[in-house]
Amino acid sequence: MNTHPSVSVLTGDLIRSRTASPETVNIAFDTLSKAAIDFGQMWDIDLRFTRYRGDGWQVLLCKPGLTLHALIFLRARLRAADAGIDTRIAAGIGALGTAGTRDLSDASGAAFVASGHALDAMSPKRQLTITGTGVTDELAALIDLTEFISMGWTAAQAEAVAHALDQNAPTHDEIAKTLGITRQAVQSRLAGAGFSYFHSALYAMQHHDFMTTQPTDD
């Protein structure tokens, strides 16, 4: 028996992209791509953002404990862009077969399968879901609540949340300086977004044990 570390794959697609203008779709993908790069730099990992199937995209998280962080961050950045388009995201936890060559278009593994199937099975009324190895009912419930709370974010609230998620823990004064607003405005936006209520959930996900023991082929 060998213990194999799990990874997290986020598979998403744009909502109602067929009725959106090409410019809107491009803004959405550009926003998500830049957000993936910024998130990777914060945590010193390469998410390898890859666009596929026209309106679909994927990222790879070698640290599955950051799944909730990434879901909130990507969602916040897209809402902050206020482009008039949103995205569904399915997180799949599992083993990694291969991370692909130049991007994730030829990647494989249980995490990719779980994520893709979860997105395909997602109700049109839902926007976030998680499945796979080590995913408990409690973790699934956290994702459900995250979806519900984040659906009410304004662009300004989402922008503040994205900055507050920086692992370097910027102060409200620093966020205010970056956004060109007052400290009180930052606090108001974060309070309106319910950000303080995510702290325990983020900690729980980050420290959850996703390791799985699988039989070898020997």
Image: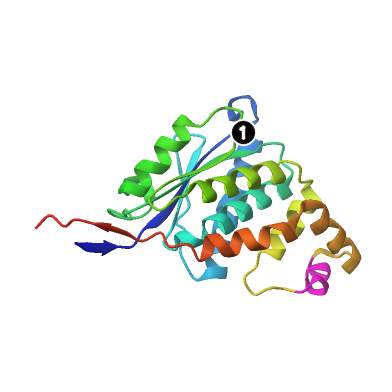
Looking at the picture, how far across and down is residue 93, in whole percent?
Answer: 41, 51
Q: In the rendered image of this protein, does residue 122 appear above or below residue 216?
A: above
Residue shown at 67% from the left, 36% from the top: 85
> In screen coordinates, is 201 left or right of 102?
right
Residue shown at 57% from the left, 27% from the top: 124
Q: Residues within 10 Å of mark 1 (few under 14, many from 20)?
A: few
Which residue is the site of mark 1? 22
Which residue of the protein is positioned furthest toward the top in this rendering?
19
Quadrant, the C terminus:
bottom left
Q: Nearer the viewer, residue 89 or 39?
A: 89
Residue shown at 50% from the left, 46% from the top: 137
Which residue of the protein is positioned furthest toward the left in this rendering?
218
> In screen coordinates, is 13 left or right of 171?
left
Magenta-span inclusion, residue 176: yes
Q: Is residue 45 visible?
A: yes
Looking at the picture, how far across and down is residue 216, in whole percent?
Answer: 16, 57
User: Which quadrant of the figure has residue 118?
Assistant: top left
User: Which quadrant of the figure has residue 203?
Assistant: bottom right
Looking at the picture, how far across and down is residue 81, in whole percent?
Answer: 71, 48
Q: Nearer the viewer, residue 41 or 121?
A: 121
Looking at the picture, how far across and down is residue 62, in whole percent?
Answer: 41, 62
> Magenta region, mostly helix, strand or loop?
helix
Which residue of the protein is positioned furthest toward the front in this rendering?
137
Q: In the rendered image of this protein, does residue 190 appear above or below residue 183?
A: above
> In screen coordinates, is 127 left or right of 164?
left
**Element type at mark 1:** helix
**Colour scheme of this structure image?**
rainbow
Residues shaded magenta: 171-178
Q: Is residue 182 visible?
A: no
